[in-house]
Amino acid sequence: MAVRHKSVETKYMEERGAALRGLRQLDRRTFMKVLAATAGAVMAKGLVPPHTFQLVNVANAAVDKSWSTAGASGTPPFMFAYLSDTHMYVRAKNQRFVKGAVKAVEDVNALDPQPDFVLFGGDLAQLGRPEELEQGQEILAMLKAPVKMMVGEHDWFYDLGDKWQQLFGPPNYSFDWKGVHVIVLMSVHEKDFWTARKLTPAERIQIVAGLDNPIQSRFEVGDEERDWLKNDLAKVPTTTPLLIFSHSPLYKYYRNWNFWTEDAEQVQALLRSYPNVTVIHGHTHQVLFNQIGNISFYGMLSTAWPWPYAPQGLPPLTVQMNRADPYDQLDGLGYGQLNVNKEGLPDMLYNLWDRNPVTIHSEYLRSHGKIYRPPAPQFASY
Amino acid sequence: MISKAAFLLTVPSLLAAAAFAALAIPSRAQQQQPTHNLPTAAHGGTIVMLCDGKTGIEVKDLKPGQTMSRAEAQSVADALMAKWQHAHPNEHWQMAQASPAAEASPAASASRGAIAPSHAAPSSSQTQSAANAPAAAPSLTVQQGDTYASFQPRDYKVWKAETDKFVADGKRIFHDDKALGSTIGVSCDMCHPDAANTHPETYPKYQVQLQKVALLRDMIDWCVENPVKGKALDPNDPKLRALEAYIYAQRKGVPLDYGKH
């Protein structure tokens, strides 16, 4: 797909990027001056969020972290980006979700410096059709940075992964990156609910695509892949930071919507001897984070639609994002950047479209909420 | 629909048959409201019909557009009743609150086709399916003889089955992009699983984006027209009514809180 014109958002991101780079050059004293002047200018104009781009918040995000300074010890800091849950039908059927994905690709391409790699968090397609997956591959191919693929249930359950694996390779794999061991899991296996019911592939994916459809099974990593994970970790010293990618949250949030992995505890047990473990997951389409023992969890944003917070089971450390405005197709959506510090722990930057960005400092979760608490929502879920 | 299945398996066959009959009734939205077919007035007056739809008399002096005084209307009602009783000499007409003892006797209950109180004492599955029914079985300690007291557990079950069917229809439409008329494959559940975040209890409220006080149906229609990219539904469209029913059903027990943002 040819992109001949820069969108308003792309220009905005370029301007924002330039402002951020400038701010990183400032010493603290000068920064405080800029901060005060900017706040004054904003107030003088009578501008309040969400109608303005708030340089103040971005400036805070810029100085609040270690990503701009090289690590003195441990692993060298690096940054990667994600986009996730694009849920694309073919363009002829639905333009909206394609536009969301393309916008995220443009935004990530506008990042300077570029991320080391871009994780795709799964659910590239809406109904797992080969043409949907091929179109998705074409759009992701526009990314300048290398792409690491993860599979979601919407990609898998039409042909049980045939087309996806043909396009993108095995669904679970690992690699080492700047001292961090990175593992990509296929966490959305489901027990067979279709054979006994004599369901066609189209009927099967339609059921899986319904978040609240109770006919489908609960997600699981499964025995075979847990064995693979165990073997993979056997070669990795426990001093190595781990970065795990899974489509479903590797804990139990809300069963009815598969915000859930059935064998989560067994997977967590395999990770227990590593002090620094971070799990980045898709599927939940919301600002979401959790800490269980040594493991920090972050949910990724979608580019298609936001999910409401579930009626039960929300991790107590999660600070909800304001409810999404139904009249704004981009609200509550976006993409993210993860700035990995020299301990191998990422800070999560939620780049929400049409809102201020939100940064979750790794020490917020690691301190169990004692420090770096993100701002509270004005409009939490009903 | 679990409750309906349990209900069919556990209650006596008489009731099961009644429930089946009830399920076969088309929903109200599809059904014509019953009306009386009035004969033509022979003397240029107005035909007044009893609720049976058969017993009628012509009030000769009553022209279209005119009303009767209270006394005149009462005399017409009395004449209608007398005509009905004359035509049905063997029917026993019992005035309200005439005989509570007869109402409560097992024989009287059985003769009306009602279930005995022991059947109404619920097993756990029956409790669920009859959740809306009054708890107490008829006895001398509760009021008798009026309209509501004459309804039986069977009635409540039939009503519940009808209501659940209406809600289930709404659930189906809520999850079906084609039934919603979406041109882009989008259905309500894609943003509102289990109708989450629809907060029907907060309407009516001023909806700033619509620049007016909105009811739930206004928001449903807005969603059908915009994110779903279908055609807005008429307020009386059975689909809109069913969607509304499903959304409210998902919030059972949540206090009404109109105007909340």
Image (tube, helix red, strand yellow):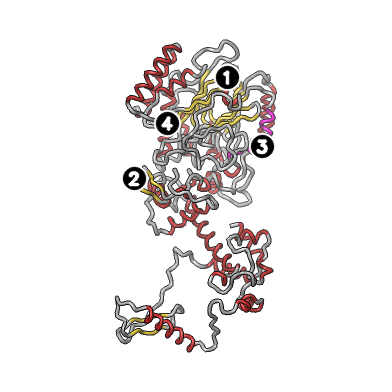
Residue at (62%, 73%) from the top-left corner? B114
Residue identified by numbered label 2: B211
Work out whether mark 4 precedes mark 1 in sequence or the reverse, and give the earlier one: 1
- Density class for disc 2 (Cα within 10 Å; few <14, some 14-19, many ≥20) is few
Residue at (41%, 12%) from the top-left corner? A30
Of tags 3 and 1, the one toward the viewer is 3
Q: Amino acid at mark 2?
A: Gln
Residue extent of the magenta highlight: A259-270
Whether tag 4 and tag 3 are in contact, CB under 8 A, the answer is no
Q: Amino acid at mark 1?
A: Trp
Q: Amino acid at mark 3?
A: Asp
Residue identified by numbered label 3: A263
Q: CA distance from mark 3 to mark 2?
A: 49 Å
Query: What subunit carries mark 3?
Result: A
Which label sits on residue A177?
1
Which label sits on residue A355?
4
